[in-house]
Image (tube, grey):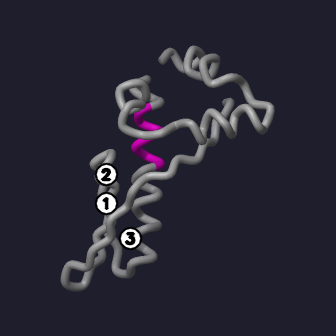
Amino acid sequence: MNQMEFTVKLPVKIIKRKNWYVASCPSLDVHSQGETERKARQNLREALSVFFTSCLTKKALRAIEDRIDLEGARKALREKGGIPWNQAKAELGL
């Protein structure tokens, strides 16, 4: 199975609620929590990974493209000799 890796910078908010830290990515409406700030951030990364995997699986990445800046992903693909972004989207059926 071919894999594609990309990096996206997203705004994150972390607040403390009683004994828990709540980590949120308001741009994508993805949230997580943890007993420490570090664990909440780590859990949010995992939740975002699942979110993006789900988008790719459902071929729904196009629906969220306007909500995030994927220029970093495009640049990484070009710099690492990867396939062009349009080709990657076409292969995923986007």
Compared with 38, 5 (above or below) is above
Q: Quadrant of residue 65?
A: top left
Of marks 3 and 1, which one's residue comes earlier in the chain? 1
Q: Quick one: label 1, few (<14), some, or many (20+) residues within 10 Å?
A: many
Q: Main secondary structure of the magenta part?
A: helix
Mark 2 secondary-structure assignment: strand
Residue sitting at x 28%, y 70%? 22
Position of residue 32 in the picture relative to residue 79 (left or right): left
| Quadrant that contains the N terminus | top right
Which residue sits furthest left? 18
Magenta-drawn segment = 49-55
Residue type highlighted by circle 1:
Ser
The residue tagged 1 is 24
Position of residue 78 in the picture relative to residue 50 (left or right): right
The residue tagged 2 is 30
Residue 45 position, x and y percent, is: 46, 58
Nearer the observer: mark 3 or 1; the answer is: 1
Disc 2 and disc 1: Cα gap in Å?
A: 6 Å
Q: Which mark is residue 40?
A: 3
Residue 79 position, x and y percent, is: 77, 37
- Residues at marks 2 and 1 touching, judged by CB atoms closer than 8 Å: yes
Of marks 3 and 2, which one's residue comes earlier in the chain? 2
Residue 86 position, x and y percent, is: 60, 18
Residue 38 position, x and y percent, is: 45, 76
